[in-house]
Image (tube, rainbow, N blue to C red):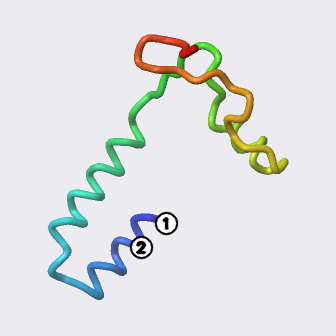
Amino acid sequence: MAMTTLGKLVDARPELEPAVVLLRALIGGVAEVTVSLADGVPSADAARLRLDAGIPALEGEPMLDSVGLLG
């Protein structure tokens, strides 16, 4: 979907094509990145389920900083 939207953007604003080429490369690269979450951090699926149930995604979850749990 993002790629289609970017194509429409270039159709409407051809001068933005260099930026769109960069965005397409970034989107492709991000799709290949493997994400590893620290123990205890809820996954995106868990957050989505909470949001669908009307619960804030991170309610009651411990907060992490760059070295571990805050608190």
| Mark number displayed over residue 5 | 2
Q: From the viewer's perspective, is residue 32 above or below residue 3?
A: above
Residue furthest out toward the front? 71
Residue furthest out toward the right? 53
Label 2 secondary element: helix
Q: What type is the residue that disc 2 sits on?
A: Thr
Give me the residue at 19% from left, 73% from top: 17
In the depicted view, which residue is nearer to us: 53 or 4?
53
Q: State which quadrant residue 24 falls in.
A: bottom left
Q: What type is the residue that disc 1 sits on?
A: Met
Give me the residue at 49% from left, 66% from top: 1
Residue 9 in the image: state x and y as whole percent.
32, 79
Label 1 secondary element: loop
* Left or right relative to 70: residue 20: left
Q: From the viewer's perspective, is residue 39 above or below residue 33?
A: above
Mark 2, residues whose alpha carbon is within 10 Å: few (<14), some, or many (≥20)? few
Give me the residue at 37% from left, 42% from top: 30
Residue 29 in the image: state x and y as whole percent.
32, 42
* Left or right relative to 37: residue 27: left
In the depicted view, which residue is nearer to us: 59 or 40?
59
Q: CA distance from mark 2 to mark 1?
A: 6 Å
